[in-house]
Amino acid sequence: MGKTQKRQNFKWTDSAVVNNATYFDYLNRFERLARSIFEWVNLPKSMNARWLERCLFYKGTAALLYDEKYGFINTNAASAGYVNVYGLPTKLNCYSYEFQQMRNLYTGFNELDSEEEIENKKSNECILVMNNWECVPTFSTMELFAYRLYEAQRTCDTNIKAQKTPIMVVVDEKQRLLMENLYNQYDGNQPFIFGDNGQLSTDIMKSVNTNAPYIADKVTEYKKEIWNEALEYLGINTMAIEKKERLITDEASSNNELINLNLQSFLAPRQEAARQFNELFGLTGTDKEISVRVRSDLYNVIKNELSTVKDFDFDNDGILEKEEIEKEGEIDG
């Protein structure tokens, strides 16, 4: 198909717009979730938790430091210098809008420094904040999940359209625009009446039945699995019981353990950065000590196993269904 035909084919243009909108919609949903999981507590007013989590989401690293002009700030961070004994860069390029400095990485080495050397460290060193222990951005993984969801959703849309118009119309190229206009009315749920002046006839128009099977329901189930897998990667519990099937204690515990480990892979590096920050600037044990934690509502869902299995409770055999619980309550009453 040539460029001219592509420009004239408005349905092709609409499809491309919806494709992009669908993909970026899923990606934006994941970003909002990922950047809302952790809460930075007691950050100095000159620091910004929103920007900190954004750097970690897109870049995988960030830096905490003290600047004479701005005070305590957080910036993007890029590796520089050599590699130390722990495989970390000896220097970081700390940068943001209207800011760029090369800083030494704080490691905690040589703790018996003089007071003058300690003060010098505060102005020349920085703390590396890692999104995970490998400094991998969350964005790269969320892109893959968003792409799979986009493919699944657009497959559903196309399949549903095929149920509405399960035929392919073959016409002469001269009649193409005419048929597109007619189909636009049909696709928009509008009745149309066409007065034929010999423009359309069975000689120049043929239809082919596509016999497209309905698969949207199966693709929707697949989409739910991808969505749940993405949330579990972020450390968000997705255990939901839609059917009254028996669930054993080990299955619920295993699911919670996996989610908790995923969550800890993001939380532990952040907590280590907070510990180093407090150590470098002498905030440990004071009311100015900073910390990072999972937002309380999410933490309760992950840690309280029974709260995630609302329709079931456990007995000595491993499971007690909701109906049995209600009956026992009536007997006790």
Image (cartoon, rainbow, N blue to C red):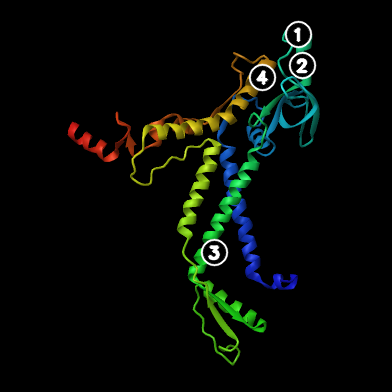
Badge 1 amino acid: Asp
Instruction: Name the residue that disc number 4 marks.
Output: 276
Q: Position of residue 31 (x, y in %)?
A: 60, 42
- Where on the picture, by quarter, is residue 171? bottom right
Secondary structure beneath dot 3 equals: helix
Q: Disc 1, disc 2: CB below 8 Å?
A: yes
Secondary structure beneath dot 1 equals: loop
Q: In the drawing, what numbered circle is on residue 204? A: none
Earlier-in-chain disc, 3 versus 1 = 1
Q: Position of residue 229 (x, y in %)?
A: 52, 42
Q: At x 53% / y 62%, what residue is drawn?
A: 157
Q: At x 65% / y 27%, what residue is drawn?
A: 45
Instruction: Name the residue that disc number 2 marks.
Output: 121
Q: In the drawing, what numbered circle is on residue 158? A: 3
Q: Nearer the viewer, mark 3 or mark 2?
A: 3
Image position of 103 (left or right of 298) = right
Q: Is residue 200 above or below residue 307?
A: below
- Which sits in the foreground, 33 or 310? 310
Image position of 226 (left or right of 173) = left
Earlier-in-chain disc, 1 versus 4 = 1
How far separated are the C-alphas under marks 3 and 2?
60 Å
Secondary structure beneath dot 4 equals: helix
How far separated are the C-alphas under marks 3 and 1?
67 Å
Q: Position of residue 256 (x, y in %)?
A: 46, 33
Q: Residues within 10 Å of mark 1 (few under 14, many from 20)?
A: few
Badge 3 amino acid: Thr
